[in-house]
Image (cartoon, rainbow, N blue to C red):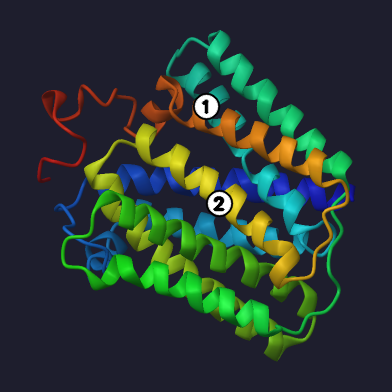
Amino acid sequence: MLTGLLLALGAAACFESSYVLQALEVRAVSPMTRASLGALRGLAARPVWRASIALGLAGFALQVLALRHIALSLLQPLLATGLLGLLAVSAGLLGERVGRREVAAVAAIVAGVAFVALADPQRGEDGAAGLAFVLVTVALAAVALSAFARRRPGDGGLLAGAIAADAITALAAAQAARTLPGVPGTAAWCALAAAGGIAAVAAESAVLQRRGAARVAPVVLAGQVAVPVMLAPLVIDERWGSAPLLVCGLTLVIAGSAVLASSQGVSRLALGGQSEHEIGGGREVGSAEA
């Protein structure tokens, strides 16, 4: 299990670093009125944004390897620990004060992960996708695609699309971990995960231009933690162990993540060291063209 925990922590560091770089870069291009693959072309020309994608891919590889050792129901809460690193960086580089609110949030995340570990969720061993997996994936894909179908989707639709796409990636990663080292099967699951990841990046990029990271990150993180875990017993045959402990742990992780992601220090990292009020002279983040 220790190997899986260390790999999960590495994935968390990669994912959070990738998110911060993406949040920085989407504010440096012309505003995106909707989620679309074409809208990512301008971002793809920027070296920092490409670096963020490379970090995301590294995080995915570590995630798949971690899922060889631990259950998805444990890995997803562990990914929230990446916020602890962002808090430390914001305090060290930006001089942000770590107050009681942030300390309580850190304690909640650590305690929540401990509760989930004590619940002892168990990995499913069957690598074949059953009918439930197919139906759930189709439903998630429909939600994700709705963010692309509308010409001017609302923030709620974009966030729902990003969370649904992230859930597809997480569930596909769990299947990829089970099919290793079978190259054809693993490649197919990685392709599905990549499709989910691209959709999630497009949706998140669009909403990050409209809302500050402090508003977007808590919602996305909560969805990334909760949705795959809630679906895991149904679609990938995981066993939760002690359900009350697991639910209690998830609640603590989600609450702590929401508080920490909305803190001034963490959100400033995604704004290049500025506060949201300083961006655009107090206007909504992303409202001004580059």
Q: Which residue is drawn at 73% across and 58% down?
A: 72
Question: Can you tell which quarter of the image residue 233 is in?
Answer: bottom right
* Image x and y of residue 269, in percent: 40, 30
Type of amino acid at the residue the image marks with label 1: Leu
Residue position marked by numbered label 1 in the rendering:
260
* Image x and y of residue 251, in percent: 65, 36
Type of amino acid at the residue the image marks with label 2: Gln
Vertical side of 288 occupied by 155: above or below: below
Question: Can you tell which quarter of the image residue 213 is in?
Answer: top left
* Image x and y of residue 217, in percent: 43, 40
Residue 215 shown left or right of residue 95 in the figure:
left
Q: Earlier in the sequence, mark 1 or mark 2?
A: 2
In the picture, the disc for residue 18 is none
Vertical side of 49 occupied by 12: above or below: above
In the picture, the disc for residue 224 is 2
Please tell me whether mark 2 sits on a helix, a strand or a loop. helix
Vertical side of 64 occupied by 74: above or below: above
- Which is nearer the eye, 32 or 7? 32
Question: Can you tell which quarter of the image residue 53 is in?
Answer: bottom left
Q: Which residue is drawn at 74% across and 71% down?
A: 236
Please tell me whether mark 1 sits on a helix, a strand or a loop. helix
Q: Circle 1: is it few (<14), some (14-19), or many (20+) Cα within 10 Å?
A: many
Vertical side of 248 occupied by 74: above or below: below
Q: Which residue is drawn at 83% across and 69% down?
A: 124
Q: Residue at x 39, y 61 (%)?
A: 161
